[in-house]
């Protein structure tokens, strides 16, 4: 009888689905009664007992099969059909998009306040109104619904029962809700018998429906293209994404607080100008219709900030966007965030000390240690350990290239002799350098090969040649070099700083050298900015200038190897337009 009650498919033994809890007891009772009758042997008892058992088993197996065949709450497979069906069902509701929901508490506040509530206890006097997005929905019978509600990164369970629901429309109200919907909840707080902090709602309301089928909680959202193009969906599904951007905010706040407590003034400078200066980069070009004027998006705010120092703002900084019309790869995005500060009466040695102090303390605050693991090739590859403990090594650029290559380089890097020596060295080590093969570009490639690619822990590369640094001041004791440093970690540049060049005559000569390089085909070379040279003639005090790439720092501390992971809306190649764009008018109306 036990075997006969199990469903079978032709020519194979079928495995029945899990038996519903309400059917387990009668099924077990029938089985035990049959076994008892068989053991006792008296014929009348045996016949009547087996007859009763057979009837119960027949009824139980019928209920079992009916329960197994009953429809299970699940989303439709076809996303287009899901959206159309959802819109159709929502049009029957009197109100879909209410104007307001009076929230008086957040999920995070409730978790913090009632975190020590005992299991099974409910505080009927503690009634709150909250709101959030439905992450998951579960049903237990006709009179009980469970939801996981997420709000601002925190999650709490809703235990909705017909007993506490206001009104007699419990089933109708809860049949509306789907995963992804934003709902409002009013009810008391407590803890379930299993220890889950929960809201026990007296009323729930749909605030904004989700018309699309969300990815599964288990599989998540993995496709990178979808994640970057639909960051809102990425934030909904993948909890770690939110943590990355919380860390980004913490990093920016730490930098801002560090500088403000040292009497720096935060300012904003123009994003567009007729000239692009402050860095060697190819600009974006736009057009101002009112003045019929071609403008360049800024590549760096440097020159404006130094003009403010000339004007008497001794300590100034800006955190903002820069735009460079260059490649897109794992570490470059056309628009990126930087922090630049300028400090009167300081030089590059003081800025190196400040950099060590700022970043080592930042790492300790965010990571609780100076050492942490980083996956440079992605989370599936082996990690490296990065140590931000100060002091950090300081390597002279030209001297280290000579040491690693076993050569001696001419110090007059503006000469053709020096350029040819650098060219020969690059060729002998098979170092690729696109044309034009200027001395500055060759030095940059040689530095990458012999120094940058070998760095793991924070290291300062110092004393760059003047030909690479048109805005940096000449070195006090080493001809042809400058008082400049770059901070590298794991082969990537994080900071660039130097003692500022404040001699207007020398600055003009450096600009003119850059203009000649531009005429020779170097489209990243700077142009002559006569307005800035004139400003220098009014007197720039001895000044140290410093710049940091915020995105790359976030990549390092958040353990991301792709810059798109730390920019909310990164630059993406446009997709082909869909055959039919969904019409806003096709959606559910507000009040009907």
Image (cartoon, grey):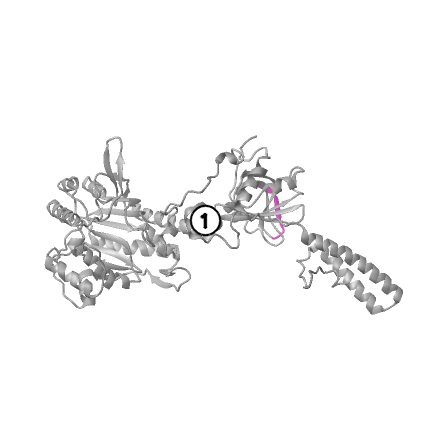
**Rendering coords of residue 53 (x, y %):** 80, 60
* Front-lying residue, 120 or 399: 399
Circle count: 1
| Residue furthest to the right | 44
Residue with the mark numbered 1: 234
Quadrant of the drawing holding the C terminus: top right
* Vertical comparison of 555 with 110: above or below: below
Question: For numbered disc 1, what is the local secondary structure?
Answer: helix
Query: Would residue 16 be counted in the magenta stretch?
Result: no
**Rendering coords of residue 562 (x, y %):** 36, 54
* Front-lying residue, 140 or 424: 424
Among the 4 quarters of the image, the one containing residue 381? bottom left
Quadrant of the drawing holding the N terminus: bottom right
Query: Would residue 125 be counted in the magenta stretch?
Result: yes
Report whether residue 184 is seen.
no
Tell me the chief SS of the magenta region.
Answer: strand
* Front-lying residue, 110 or 29: 29
**Rendering coords of residue 478 (x, y %):** 13, 58
Report whether residue 168 is seen.
yes
Residue located at (78% from left, 60% from top): 30
**Rendering coords of residue 31 (x, y %):** 77, 63
Instruction: Specify the segment rendered in magenta.
Output: 119-128
* Front-lying residue, 585 or 441: 585
Among the 4 quarters of the image, the one containing residue 38? bottom right
Label 1 neighbour load within 10 Å: few <14, some 14-19, many 20+: many
């Amino acid at each position: 009888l036990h075997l006969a009650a199990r469903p079978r498919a032709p020519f194979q033994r079928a495995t029945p689905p899990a038996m519903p809890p309400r059917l387990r007891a009668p099924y077990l009772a029938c089985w035990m009664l049959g076994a008892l009758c068989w053991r006792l042997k008296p014929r009348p008892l045996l016949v009547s007992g087996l007859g009763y058992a057979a009837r119960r088993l027949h009824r139980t197996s019928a209920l079992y099969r009916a329960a197994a065949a009953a429809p299970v709450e699940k989303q439709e497979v076809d996303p287009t059909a899901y959206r159309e069906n959802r819109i159709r069902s929502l049009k029957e509701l009197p109100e879909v998009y209410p104007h307001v929901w009076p929230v008086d508490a957040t999920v995070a506040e409730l978790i913090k306040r009632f975190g020590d509530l005992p299991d099974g206890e409910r505080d009927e006097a503690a009634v709150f109104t909250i709101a959030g997005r439905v992450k998951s929905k579960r049903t237990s019978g006709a009179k009980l619904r469970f939801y996981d509600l997420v709000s601002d990164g925190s999650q709490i369970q809703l235990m909705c029962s017909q007993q506490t629901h206001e009104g007699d429309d419990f089933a109708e109200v809860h049949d509306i809700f789907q995963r992804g919907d934003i709902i409002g909840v009013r009810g008391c707080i407590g803890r379930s018998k299993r220890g889950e902090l929960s809201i026990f709602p007296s009323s729930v309301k749909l605030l904004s429906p989700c018309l699309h089928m969300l990815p599964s909680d288990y599989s998540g959202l993995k496709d990178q293209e979808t994640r970057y193009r639909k960051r809102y969906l990425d934030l909904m599904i993948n909890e770690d994404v939110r943590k990355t951007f919380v860390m980004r905010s913490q990093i920016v706040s730490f930098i801002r607080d560090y500088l403000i407590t040292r009497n720096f003034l935060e300012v904003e400078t123009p994003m567009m100008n007729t000239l692009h200066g402050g860095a060697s980069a190819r600009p974006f070009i736009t057009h101002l219709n009112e003045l019929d004027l071609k403008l360049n998006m800024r590549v760096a705010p440097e020159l404006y900030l130094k003009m403010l120092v000339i004007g008497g703002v001794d300590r100034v900084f800006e955190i903002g966007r820069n735009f460079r019309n260059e490649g897109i790869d794992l570490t470059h995005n056309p628009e990126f965030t930087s922090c630049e500060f300028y400090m009167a009466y300081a030089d590059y040695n003081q800025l190196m000390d400040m950099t060590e102090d700022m970043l080592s303390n930042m790492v300790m605050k965010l990571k609780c240690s100076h050492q942490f693991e980083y996956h440079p090739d992605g989370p599936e590859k082996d990690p490296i350990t990065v140590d931000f403990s100060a002091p950090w090594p300081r390597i002279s650029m030209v001297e280290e290239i000579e040491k690693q290559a076993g050569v001696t380089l001419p110090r007059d890097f503006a000469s053709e002799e020096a350029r040819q020596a650098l060219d020969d060295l690059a060729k002998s080590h098979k170092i690729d350098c696109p044309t034009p093969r200027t001395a500055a570009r060759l030095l940059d490639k040689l530095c990458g090969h012999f120094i940058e690619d070998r760095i793991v822990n924070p290291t300062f590369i110092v004393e760059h040649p003047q030909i690479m640094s048109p805005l940096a001041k000449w070195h006090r004791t080493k001809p042809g070099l400058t008082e400049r440093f770059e901070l590298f970690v794991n082969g990537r540049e994080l900071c660039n700083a130097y003692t500022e060049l404040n001699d207007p005559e020398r600055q003009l000569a450096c600009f003119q050298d850059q203009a000649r390089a531009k005429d020779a085909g170097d489209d990243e070379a700077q142009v002559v900015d006569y307005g800035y040279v004139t400003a220098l003639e009014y007197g720039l005090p001895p000044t140290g200038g410093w710049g940091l790439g915020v995105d790359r720092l976030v990549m390092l501390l958040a353990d991301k190897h792709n810059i798109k992971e730390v920019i909310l809306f990164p630059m993406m190649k446009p997709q082909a337009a869909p055959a039919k764009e969904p019409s806003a008018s096709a959606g559910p109306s507000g009040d009907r």
